[in-house]
Image (cartoon, rainbow, N blue to C red):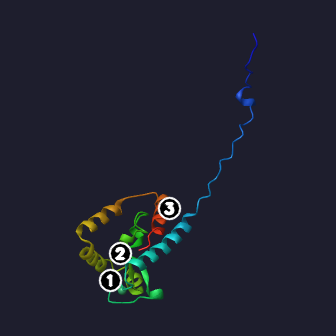
Amino acid sequence: MRRTGFKRKPISEQKPMKRTKLKKVSKKPISKIQRELWIECRRIASLWYKKDCYTCQAKKLEGSNCQLGHVPYPKSVLGANLKYSMKVLRWQCFACNIHRGGAGAEAYKRMLREEGKAFMEELELEKQKTVNAYDEYVALLEYYKSITE
Ligand SMILES: [Zn+2]
């Protein structure tokens, strides 16, 4: 009877298997996506909101006095699901955004008045959520690029 198999060498004598190189899909660095996202956020805010400060009387903001602030919560307490969300981004003057740390109390009052209680509660819930930043940003960037009005 012909033997068709071959004798395997003991594991110790086998050469390590050649690994097939996985094709690396070049992933955009997250920092680049974030930079692009921020540009989109400013573009959309320009479409949607007048360039007046959300939290004081300053009007027609320009240059470094025209900041896109996180309201009513500061950026530092927001997760990836809200950092670039238009829900929490409004134009603010330099003083409100930087010196007054976003003027959260004022912003909260105005937001509650304009968006309603349900919106504020929803926002509070969203603030507790954790998402995968990279996936969130990629999806958001694609969505934002489609916004034209
Ligand atoms: Zn202001």
Split into quadrants, the picture shows ligand 1 in the one at bottom left
Residue marked by disc 1: 55
Horizontal and vertical percent position of residue 123: 31, 66
| Front-lying residue, 85 or 146 | 146
Badge nearest the viewer, 3 or 1: 3
Q: CA distance from mark 3 to mark 1?
A: 31 Å
Give the CA separation, mark 3 to mark 2.
23 Å
Please state which amino acid type lies under the numbered disc 2: Val
Q: Which mark is residue 47?
A: none
**Circle nearer the N terminus (2, 1):** 1
Q: Is mark 1 within 8 Å of ligand 1?
A: yes
Q: Which residue extends farthest front?
A: 148
Give above or below for 2 relative to 61.
Answer: above
Image: 58 above or below 4:
below
Residue on which the image places disc 3:
138
Q: Amino acid at mark 1?
A: Thr
Tag 2 residue: 71
Q: Quadrant of residue 95?
A: bottom left
Tell which of 110 and 101 is nearer to you: 110
Horizontal side, residue 124 vs residue 27: left or right: left
Contact (Cβ within 8 Å) of mark 2 with mark 1: yes
Mark closest to the chain's N terminus, 3 or 2: 2
Spatial distance from mark 2 to mark 1, Cα to Cα? 9 Å
Percent coordinates x, y for residue 103 in the rendering = 34, 80
Q: Is residue 63 left or right of residue 14?
A: left
In-front residue for pair 51/127: 51
Query: Which class describes the residues within 10 Å of circle 3: few (<14), some (14-19), or many (20+)?
Result: some
